[in-house]
Each structure stands twice: as structure tokens, then as C-alpha cells.
């Protein structure tokens, strides 16, 4: 019901007595199943009179946790994970640039750049707006599988960096953010013109962002367990 979409984010799956009766299982079996689902992030079990089992839609945090375990086991560095994102995101740019009817996509991307401009002095709000720009950029490329993979990689890199602390003043300075927005506005211009050069331009931009964003943590092995512990 959760994965199929029949239950939305925050929907009440039911309370323990109701679930025992509905699924015809014993209370210990139900509790074990709920424990597994909660560990996977698919539900939250609230205790008390007004408690119950709350459903959560699968998202990039879930895929990032699983993906990071595989990457960590293979000693994959943050630089390697970011490089994958830097290679994939321009593919979405290529798809948008080649599309004949892209006016709506261009308008949305331009509005998302403006939103970042409004929050540029507030690092936390800017980070949310910036993540939204990248998510929508890939989604507008039209390939949903690519969007999921890029969201996962972004989540892995951002959370891994946060787990070990700030990488330096440069990555979070308003001046650096303004440079990034200038690149985004240039990208939107190239996309609006349907210029094939947009793909290469964005690949170069992402490579530069990786150097600033990762800093001295580039060689560190992917690890979300520090943050999740």
C-alpha cells in the first residue's frame, strides 16, 4: 500500500489492534514487521492513546542510505560520487535544450533561480532553494529514473559532507553563491536558445562546483552512518 502509492505521506495506516485483525497475524509478528518497516523509514510508529502507524512515501533519503552502504563497502570517495552526479545532470540539460516545447520549463527554472536570489543571505534557506533547482532541472529532462539516481547522489554527497562538518568558508559564502547563480542564469539563457553548448557548459560548471563543495573532503569515503547514528 505504501510503495504502490495507495497511502500518501503522513497517512494513518492504522493502530496495532486494527492491523492485527486486518492482516490476521499475531501481535509479535506484527510488531516485528513494523520494526523492519520503521528501520527502512517507510513508517513511524507513534505510541500512546492518539498513536498509530504513520506511512511515509519512499524518497531520496531511503535510496541514499542503501546506496551509501554499497558505495562505502567499495571504498568509493565523495569525489567519485559527485563526479557521477556531474556527468548525469548535463544529460537532463541536453534533453531540455533539444525539446521543441520548452517554454514552460525555462520559465520554471528562471523562477527557481530568482527564488535562490531572494534567499542568498540565508544559507539554510538558500540550500533548500538550490537543491530544488537541481532537482527540477533533472526532472524537467523527462527521465524519471535519471531524476531518482541524481537525487540519491546529491543526498549522499550533501549528507556525507554535513556528517564531517563544514568544508570551509568558500563553499558557503554569499559571493560564491552569487557566482553559482550567474552560471545558472547563463544556463537558462542557453536552454532558452536551444543551444547544444548548454550540456558542456553545465558539465564544466558542475566540475567546478565539486571542487569548491568537497574541498578537503574529496578523498573521504562515502559514509552516512556518522550522521544517522
Image (cartoon, rainbow, N blue to C red):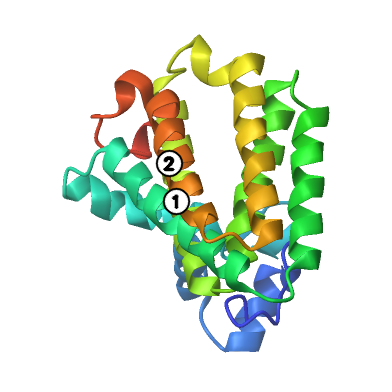
Helix, strand or loop under label 2: helix
The residue located at (24%, 38%) in the rendering is 77
Q: Is residue 45 visible?
A: no
Q: Residues within 10 Å of mark 2 (few under 14, many from 20)?
A: some
Q: Is residue 209 left or right of residue 195?
A: left
Q: Residues within 10 Å of mark 1 (few under 14, many from 20)?
A: some
The residue located at (75%, 34%) in the rendering is 116
Helix, strand or loop under label 1: helix
Q: Is residue 49 left or right of residue 74?
A: right
Q: Is residue 221 visible?
A: yes
Residue 10, position in %: x, y?
74, 61
In the rendered image, which quarter contains the N terminus? bottom right
> Mark 2 near mark 1, Cβ–Cβ under 8 Å?
yes
Q: Nearer the viewer, residue 221 or 139?
A: 139
Q: Is residue 111 above or below residue 35?
A: above
Q: Is residue 153 left or right of residue 8?
A: left
In the rendered image, which quarter contains the C terminus? top left
The quadrant where residue 54 appears: bottom right
Question: What distance separates the C-alpha of mark 2 from that of mark 1?
Answer: 6 Å
Q: Which mark is residue 200?
A: 1
The quadrant where residue 8 appears: bottom right
The residue located at (61%, 25%) in the rendering is 179
Q: Is residue 76 above or below residue 49?
A: above
**Residue with the mark numbered 2:** 204
Q: Nearer the viewer, residue 123 or 57?
A: 123
Residue 43, position in %: x, y?
60, 62
Q: Nearer the viewer, residue 82 or 107?
A: 107
Amino acid at each position: 500500500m505504501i510503495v504502490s502509492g495507495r497511502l500518501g505521506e503522513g497517512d494513518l495506516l492504522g493502530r496495532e489492534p486494527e492491523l492485527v485483525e486486518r492482516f490476521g497475524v499475531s501481535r509479535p509478528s506484527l510488531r516485528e514487521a513494523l520494526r523492519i518497516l520503521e528501520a527502512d523509514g517507510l513508517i513511524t510508529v507513534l505510541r500512546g492513546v492518539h498513536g498509530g502507524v504513520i506511512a511515509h512515501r519512499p524518497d531520496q533519503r531511503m535510496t541514499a542510505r542503501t546506496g551509501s552502504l554499497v558505495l562505502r563497502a567499495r571504498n568509493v570517495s565523495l569525489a567519485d560520487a559527485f563526479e557521477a552526479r556531474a556527468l548525469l545532470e548535463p544529460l537532463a540539460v541536453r534533453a531540455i535544450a533539444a525539446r521543441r516545447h520548452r517554454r514552460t520549463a525555462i520559465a520554471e527554472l528562471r523562477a527557481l533561480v530568482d527564488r535562490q536570489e531572494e534567499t542568498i543571505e540565508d544559507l539554510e534557506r538558500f540550500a533548500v532553494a538550490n537543491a530544488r533547482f537541481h532537482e527540477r532541472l533533472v526532472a524537467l529532462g523527462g527521465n524519471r529514473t535519471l531524476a531518482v539516481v541524481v537525487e540519491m547522489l546529491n543526498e549522499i554527497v550533501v549528507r556525507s559532507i554535513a556528517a564531517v562538518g563544514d568544508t570551509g568558508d568558500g563553499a558557503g559564502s554569499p559571493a560564491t553563491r552569487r557566482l553559482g547563480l550567474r552560471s545558472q542564469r547563463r544556463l537558462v539563457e542557453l536552454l532558452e536558445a536551444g543551444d547544444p553548448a548548454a550540456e558542456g557548459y553545465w558539465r564544466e560548471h558542475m566540475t567546478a562546483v565539486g571542487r569548491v563543495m568537497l574541498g578537503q573532503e574529496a578523498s573521504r569515503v562515502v559514509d552516512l552512518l556518522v550522521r544517522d547514528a
